[in-house]
Amino acid sequence: MNDANNRSRSGWGLLWLGLTLVALAVGFDKAMTAPTEATMGNLQRIFYYHLPHVILSFVFPYLNLGASLLYLWWRGSNRSRALAADAFALASAEVTVLYATIGLATGMLWGRAAWGIWWTWDARLTTYLLLWLLYVSYLLLRQFSSTGQTAVISAVLAIFAAVDIPICYMSIRWWRTQHPAPVFGGGADSGIDPGMLPAVWWNMAAWAMWGAFVLGLRYALERRRQRQSADDAMGYLGSAQVLSEAR
Amino acid sequence: MIPFHTLSQRHLVYTYCVVWLLQFGYGAWLAVQWRRARR
């Protein structure tokens, strides 16, 4: 029964991966063939990769927050659900770091070409770097902490880390920054040429689908490791019992 | 036909490299870990 379930899940995963690769290919084509922007020329095409990664790096931390809260809620009452929530929190933090790293790197490349500088300490860039550092800290804590309370401490850290997301998101609305004002929903002057919209939405959808795929795979991997640890612990307990009975 | 002339800016080419390498590198690493983890 378990094998049949695993095969079914793998089948759906491969189907999702196939659809995602098609969406990524279409997004690549749309980004290459979108109208050329008047001021920056072809350089503006970085936008079609920078925007989806930054937007999604604001979404995954909320999944991490939700899973961390569920872990804290269930840890005293339902051990099995708590472990699943903890695995999901870890997976979403790792995907957050991946997307935020690409958001930072593509932003710096764009800044270097458009402004002549790799970095400036303006509100958006600084709060975004802080977001990246917070989730890198989260992963380092998970990797190297040796207390029995690692999951609890990291769940609490996740709650504090999530506070930075709305500040970072609103920074280009609250403060005058080197970073451009919002392209969408930023007032009367915001918006882009309608011919560029397919490139934006295809890449947004495709990278969201890819993010869901790697999140699901990372979650499944962590659940497999949890089961492996539980099996190892049971094996150790069994051996200890046999030894104690032999004495 | 892919319009390669739109890759006229090297920073745009670097962007494509960073995105594809990190994303698919991570995906490949996950696939390897998945196969290594015992059932």
Image: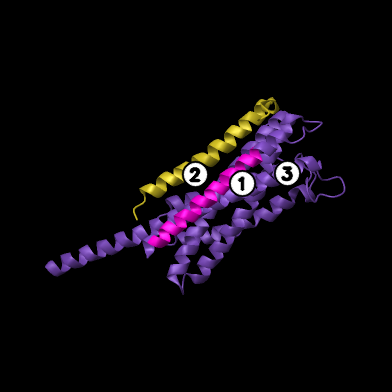
Chain colours: A purple, B yellow
Q: Tell me the quadrant of the picture where the C terminus of chain A can be found.
A: bottom left
As shown in the figure, which amino acid type bears the numbered disc 1? Trp
Mark 3 vs mark 1: which is more N-terminal? 3
As shown in the figure, which amino acid type bears the numbered disc 2? Gly
Q: Which mark is residue B27?
A: 2
- Tally of numbered tags: 3
Q: Which mark is residue A207?
A: 1
Q: CA distance from mark 2 to mark 1?
A: 13 Å
Residue drawn 61% across and 58% down? Answer: A62
Residue A27 lies in the magenta stretch: yes
Residue drawn 66% across and 47% down? Answer: A204
In front: label 3 or label 2: 3
Please determine whether, in this image, residue A159 is positioned above or below residue A17: below
Which residues are drawn in magenta?
A4-28
Q: Quadrant of residue A53?
A: top right
Dominant secondary structure (helix, strand or loop) of the stretch shown in magenta: helix
Q: Is any part of residue A206 visible from this angle?
A: yes
In front: label 3 or label 1: 3
Left or right of residue A206, residue A75 in this image:
left
Q: CA distance from mark 3 to mark 2?
A: 26 Å
Q: Tell me the quadrant of the picture where the N terminus of chain A can be found.
A: bottom left
- The location of residue A45, given as percent across then percent down, is 71, 35
Left or right of residue B20, residue A221 in this image:
left
Please determine whether, in this image, residue A62 is positioned above or below residue A23: below
Q: Check chain identity for marks 3 and 1: say if they share one.
A: yes
Q: CA distance from mark 3 to mark 1?
A: 14 Å
- Name the residue tied to disc 3: A198
As shown in the figure, which amino acid type bears the numbered disc 3? Pro
Left or right of residue A15, residue A198 in this image:
right
* Chain label for disc 3: A
Q: Residues within 10 Å of mark 3 (few under 14, many from 20)?
A: some
State if disc 1 and disc 3 touch (CB < 8 Å).
no
